């Protein structure tokens, strides 16, 4: 199962679990004699939690729709049906959906902004760290190594580094792995050793091919 497929199922499971938990809590409130408006607020909270726990706005929309249907099914007369005796319930359902959707969308937006701020702070940290490491490097090889290592962190890509040797020939590629790719192997043909390509790929221990970044340092 790929990472995207795994994330998809995690989002679906979170959406279902939060909705079930909210319905149970709503039933407890109903047995305690709380008004329907209090149960509606619980379902709005359900949508907010779904927005925070999942990675896509689609699940917020789905949660909003399911919250309205579940509230109608369990807490609106006649219960255990999707019908409603009171004509005003239709307006209630519509308002509930709109409020839940807007609240969930705002939660998703805040979450995305927080992730972007964290990513920007991380990139700034890497650049400052790179500046310090390059100043501490003792020779050209040290500068090249530190540059490649920092590119791995910054771009989250495996890097193959070449540098120019005598007579304009390129050295054999030096591999710099991401932290989650320790168990990988790289095959370089004789042609690739001499003339590296930007389309080279790396094969991990699960047999999956992953693109890598090729860096060629030309000396003077």
Image (cartoon, helix red, strand yellow):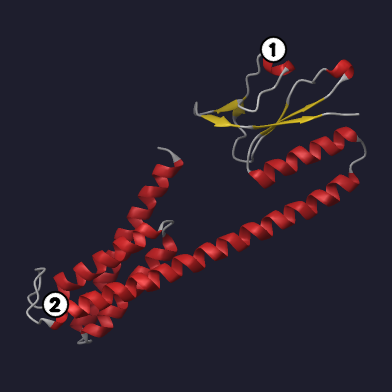
The answer to whether residue 202 is above or below residue 169 is below
Q: Residue at x 66, y 35 (%)?
A: 177
How busy is the neighbourhood of tag 1: few (under 14 within 10 Å), some, or many (20 plus)?
A: few
- The image quarter containing residue 75 is bottom left
Question: Element at badge 1?
Answer: helix
In x, y percent, where is residue 195?
A: 72, 18
Residue visible at 58% across and 60% down in the picture:
116
Identify the residue shown where x is 39% and y is 43%. Answer: 5
What element does badge 2 sit on?
loop
Label 2 packing within 10 angstroms: few (<14), some (14-19), many (20+): some
Of badges 2 and 1, nearer the viewer stands 1
**Left or right of residue 78: residue 1:** right
Residue at left offset 84%, top offset 47%: 133
Query: Where is residue 66, by image quadrant?
Result: bottom left
- The disc at residue 76 is 2
Residue 87 position in % (x across, y down): 10, 81
Residue 157 falls left or right of residue 193: left
Give residue 19's position: percent from left, percent from top: 29, 65
Residue 220: x %, y % from top left = 91, 29
Q: Mark 1 — residue?
A: 190
Q: Is 123 located above or below residue 190 in the figure?
A: below
Marks 2/1 in contact by CB < 8 Å: the verdict is no
Q: Please report whichever mark, 2 or 1, sits nearer to the chain's N-terminal start.
A: 2
When asked about the image quadrant of residue 141, the answer is top right
Name the residue nearer the viewer: 166 or 43.
166
For residue 117, above or below residue 144: below
Question: In the rendered image of this protein, does residue 216 appear above or below residue 133?
Answer: above
Could you give the CA–CA distance between mark 2 and mark 1, rounded to whole angstroms?
Answer: 73 Å
């Amino acid at each position: 199962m790929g990472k995207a497929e795994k994330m998809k199922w995690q989002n679906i499971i979170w959406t279902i679990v939060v909705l079930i938990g909210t319905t149970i809590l709503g039933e407890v409130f109903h047995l305690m004699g709380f008004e329907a408006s209090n149960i509606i607020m619980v379902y709005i909270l359900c949508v907010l939690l779904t927005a925070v726990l999942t990675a896509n706005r689609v699940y917020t929309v789905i949660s909003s729709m399911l919250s309205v249907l579940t509230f109608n099914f369990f807490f609106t007369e006649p219960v255990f049906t999707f019908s409603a005796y009171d004509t005003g319930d239709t307006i209630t359902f519509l308002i509930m959906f709109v409020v839940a959707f807007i609240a969930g969308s705002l939660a998703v937006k805040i979450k995305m902004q927080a992730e972007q701020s964290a990513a920007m702070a991380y990139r700034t940290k890497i650049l400052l760290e790179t500046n310090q490491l390059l100043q501490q490097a003792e020779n050209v090889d040290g500068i090249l190594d530190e540059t490649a290592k920092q590119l791995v962190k910054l771009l989250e890509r495996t890097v193959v580094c070449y540098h120019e040797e005598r007579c304009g020939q390129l050295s054999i590629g030096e591999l710099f792995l991401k932290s989650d790719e320790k168990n990988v192997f790289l095959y370089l043909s004789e042609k690739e050793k001499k003339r590296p390509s930007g389309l080279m790929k790396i094969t991990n221990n699960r047999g999956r091919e992953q693109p890598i970044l090729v860096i060629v340092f030309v000396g003077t």
